[in-house]
Amino acid sequence: MFKKNYRQDNGVAYLLLAPIVILLTIFVVIPFFYSLKVSFYNWSFYQPSVFVGFDNFKFVLEDDLFLNSVWVGIKFTLMVVPASMVVSFLFANVIKGMRRGSASFVKTSIYIPTIISGIVASVIFVFIYDYMGGLANYVLGWFGSEPRAWLADVKTALPSIAVPAIWLGFGLTTLIMLAGLHDIPESYYEAADLEGAGPWQKMLYITVPLMKNIVLYLTVTGFTGAISQYELSLVMTGGGPLDTTTTPNLYILNHFRNDVMVGNSIAASLLLFVVLGSISAIIFKVLNSEKAIDG
Amino acid sequence: MQAKLTFQKSVLTAIAAVFTLLALFPLAWVMIAGFKEKTEVLSTPFRFFPKQWLVTNYMDILKDAAFQKAMLTTFGGAILFAVLSILVNASAAYVFARLEFRFKAIMWLYVIITMFIPGMAILLTSFIVVNKLHMLDTFAVLVLPGVASAGAMFFIRQFYLNIPLALEEAALIDGAGKIRIFTSVFLPMSYPVFVIIGIGSYLGYWNSFVWPTMTITNPDLYQIMQYLATFRSERSTEMGMLMAGSTLSALPTIVLFLIFQKYIISGIKISGLK
């Protein structure tokens, strides 16, 4: 890549790297090692800390509430990711078939929810789910159904939070899919036309296989994103009813705020870190290896 | 055949219209609810449009000194945050893309590894660190901790790797130094990638809620999402005002997005996915 006698630029390099390295050290690396340390201590703001070894990890892994939160996170992910993938895939295909002008209008419109914050989305959807005057019960009324307490019912609370999550994310997912669709050479479809393939066959044998990488990428990032979601439940339900919307990150956050036993929740967050960190490391590896060619 | 094609086209357009409406509906509803009287926001039976269009909610929230302050400090903070994050991450991206120096591999690993540390794992210990640095209730605690981002740096670097070496050579022959090449060749070409990183950072700052809630207790420094969440819990009967406030809080972002949307949508293509 570079010749052996290539002049080195140590001075300039370190000067330009100093800001990122210093900031990352203070605000990411030191807190991370600090977290590692705290996870082995019975640590609190008010008492001297005691070394307890792996007790915190053991406690968390045996804590039903934590295990429940992981289960909630998985259920939530299973509601959000497949739904937004299917909807985005179909919609991306629809946009691809549209004329340029209207396509760009649609693209802009569906991206707008993506830039809205989780807090504003929560405010909006709390009102949509309102028992008396909410839109959800109004629509249900058309079909003659009784109103439901969407966010207070154990059965409907989690799906009700999944809806705004899909709403927030589907614009970006659709646009990424659309970018992928545009990269499929038109000649493949023309060849299939000559062979007399119908629209479904084209989708099944050309579009789907060629979109595999993008779908994989979106699935994995969607999974990590959905399982780390906590703002929606924090604002909309506070994790209730009966912890049915307490996602893992909300469990951790609630423990930070309410407990004196900080070590436990830090241990929990480190356990999640191992899982999520490895997943993102894999995505990164895949992406980086393809890109490394022009590096 | 022709008739069948036009039929297909109109079906597609109809589907697209429905989806677009569904995507925009919640926002349109909040915006319009801001024009309703507070008792009408959740009135039964459900009505989309107000009986009477009132601007009082929008006027009242705009006159609210705390809202003004939250909007202004959040906007200022978000812009500063975006500019700093572009500067810090672009310099590092340039170094990793183009310079050779001792310990490059180790430095790269050190920076990149931070990408895999989730915010939640360091939330509390970061709080302890900023507390020890006496940064609580300052502007710095909102801006500085998130500025350096290995993800943003990596994204800019991918862009820099694709800038042809030939462009630098002319400058090298003229005797320009590395910093000069960075500022006069790379920075001017970086506009599209900076728009993406800038908007991303701006959004991250504007929409952040948990970190400001933990580190800011002085109401003068309240950030907009913190303000809205507090408003919702403390003045829950003022629903019209809450709707107006939510709408206005989203407005600067939507305007920015509309200005730069061309770059954002094309940015999805250079985000390493192809």
Image: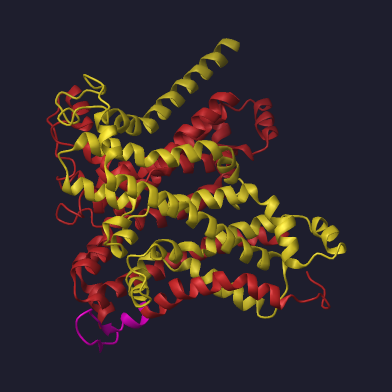
Q: Position of residue B60 (x, y in %)?
A: 25, 35
- Taking B62 as reference, is B174 left or right? right
- Taking A18 as reference, is B118 left or right? left
Quick check: is B20 in the magenta stretch? Answer: no
Question: Which residue is at 24% across, 39% downward?
Answer: B242
Nearest the eye: A109 or B92: B92
Q: Which chain is red?
A: A
The range drawn in magenta is: A35-54
Q: Colour of chain B?
A: yellow
Query: Coloured how?
Result: by chain
Question: Which residue is at 66% across, 55% downward?
Answer: B159
Nearest the eye: B101 or B67: B67
Quick check: is A49 in the magenta stretch? Answer: yes
Tell me the chief SS of the magenta region: loop
Residue B272 appears in the figure: yes
Q: Position of residue A268 (x, y in %)?
A: 30, 71
Quadrant of residue A274 in the image?
bottom left
Quadrant in which the N terminus of chain B appears = top right
Residue A86 appears in the figure: no
* Residue B231 vertical position relative to residue B151 in the rendered view, above or below: above
Nearest the eye: B118 or B136: B136
Quadrant of residue A262 in the image?
bottom left
- Taking A119 as reference, is A102 left or right? right
Question: Which residue is at 43% across, 61% downward?
Answer: B143
Q: Position of residue B220 (x, y in %)?
A: 30, 56
